[in-house]
Amino acid sequence: MIRNSLFPIFILVALATTAVAQQPRPGAPATPRPTPTATAPATAAPATQATVALPTSKIAIINTQEFMDAKTGILKFTTVVNKLNGEFQKQRDDLNALRARGEALEAEINKLRDAPAGTPIDQPALQVKVDQLEQLKKDVQRRAEDAQGAYNKRRDELFQPLQLEIGAALEAFAKARGINVVIDGAAVPLLYFEESTNITRAFIADFNSKNPAAAATTPTP
């Protein structure tokens, strides 16, 4: 590669040297230039036509969003989701209790502030409730952020092995049917495709039959 890149530079230097050598010396008689003779154009060598083997492709479409459907999707997804939600049920209940407490406290504050004209308001007591509400909101936000971070981490731990398992199963499914290209319709916009190329339902049925999951409990709303 380096030799090829230097080759044009060598040609330019050689031409420049030849031009300098042909310049007449000062005072020397001019040398008559020979009349150029026409030369026959070189006959181009016949181009060798390389034969390139074009691949034959069988393309299929799949919609991975349907994998997570609780009723018609991959059963193991439902099992993992229920397991994940079950592990964080207590955190969810605690946060809901704190939110309910905050709503009740806010209702008390609004009731005191909206008292009929002339009704005496205990300002120190009202301020205490306002401070309690502000602190409660901060606690709810902090706990919610901590719970979300822990939830995301645990979700990745549970779903990553399943995603790898599904990926391997999809590859085997495609190879067994002579499919060498699978496009995820959930990730790539598709302008048109024949429904006969959609293997989503067939793959889900095949995966569920080979990878039975335990009966899933009703998901927590």
Image (tube, grey):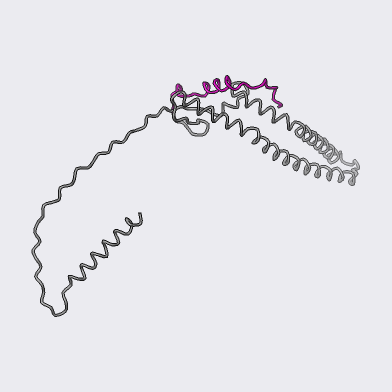
Left or right of 77? Residue 139 is right
Q: Residue at x 23, y 64 (%)?
A: 15
Compared with 70, 110 (above or below) is below
Q: Quadrant of the N terminus?
A: bottom left
Total of numbered circles in the picture? 0
The quadrant in which residue 57 appears is top left
Residue 200 within the magenta-colored segment of the rendering: yes
Q: Residue at x 20, y 67 (%)?
A: 18
Residue 221 within the magenta-colored segment of the rendering: no
The quadrant in which residue 38 appears is bottom left
Residue 121 image offset from top left, x and y in percent: 89, 43
Residue 180 image offset from top left, x and y in percent: 44, 29
Near-viewer residue (92 or 159): 159
Left or right of 200? Residue 29 is left
Near-viewer residue (148 or 24): 24
- Magenta span covers which residues? 191-220
Compared with 39, 181 (above or below) is above
Left or right of 58? Residue 36 is left
The quadrant in which residue 8 appears is bottom left
Near-viewer residue (59 or 69): 59
Q: Residue at x 67, y 38 (%)?
A: 153
Residue 206 image offset from top left, x and y in percent: 54, 21
Compared with 110, 24 (above or below) is below
Q: Quadrant of the C terminus?
A: top right
Residue 84 image offset from top left, x and y in percent: 69, 31
Left or right of 184? Residue 91 is right
Q: Residue at x 75, y 33 (%)?
A: 92
